Amino acid sequence: MKSRLGLPATGLVTGIIFGLGLSISQMTNPEKVLGFLDISDNWDPSLLFTMAAAIAVSSIGNRWILNKGPIFSEILHLPGKSDIDTRLVLGSLIFGTGWGLAGYCPGPAVTGLAGGLTDTVYFVIAMLVGSQLERLWLLRHPRTANSNDLD
């Protein structure tokens, strides 16, 4: 089944809904996120409810798609890779460290650009520079399909 909206419109609508959800839940506020991550002092559990709601909604959607098939595509595109390798572990550590230090992850940071905060702009610039450095690293150090190490 083809999308009546077309793929770009679907992405735009989904992105707007995602951005609104991030803003309403205050995930674009690094202080709110850092308060959630700081379990030793004044822990703020409110984002736990946001995560639980997101998991519930996505679980229902995933179950529906697995049973009925995708709405905007003729085939269901699932990731082909499921093993845990060095790149996944290192990437997760870098992501988690950045999230814990800055209080931002990529989606909320990009959404937070609308607020015009200098810290958000610096974070997004650093994130884009890091992404390009990783791309250049991979171009200089290509991996074989079966490799589990960074070399």
Image (spheres, rainbow, N blue to C red):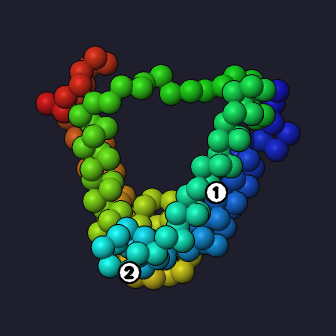
Residue at image location 78% in from the left, 41% down from the top: 6
Residue at image location 42% in from the left, 26% down from the top: 82
Q: Secondary structure at mark 2?
A: loop
Residue at image location 58% in from the left, 56% down from the top: 52
134 sits left or right of 46 in the view: left
User: Of the residues under marks 1 and 2, which one precedes in the sequence?
Assistant: 2
Residue type at numbered disc 1: Ala
Up/down of 14 relative to 149, above or below: below
User: What crowding class fits label 1: few (fewer than 14 Cα within 10 Å), some (14-19), or many (20 or more)?
Assistant: few
Label 1 or label 2, whichever lies nearer to me, is 2
- Quarter of the figure that contains the N terminus: top right
User: What crowding class fits label 2: few (fewer than 14 Cα within 10 Å), some (14-19), or many (20 or more)?
Assistant: few
Q: Secondary structure at mark 1?
A: helix
Pick the front one: 92 or 77 = 92
Q: Which residue is disc 2 drawn over?
A: 42
Distance between the alpha carbons at the discs numbered 1 and 2: 23 Å
Q: Which residue is disc 1 drawn over?
A: 53
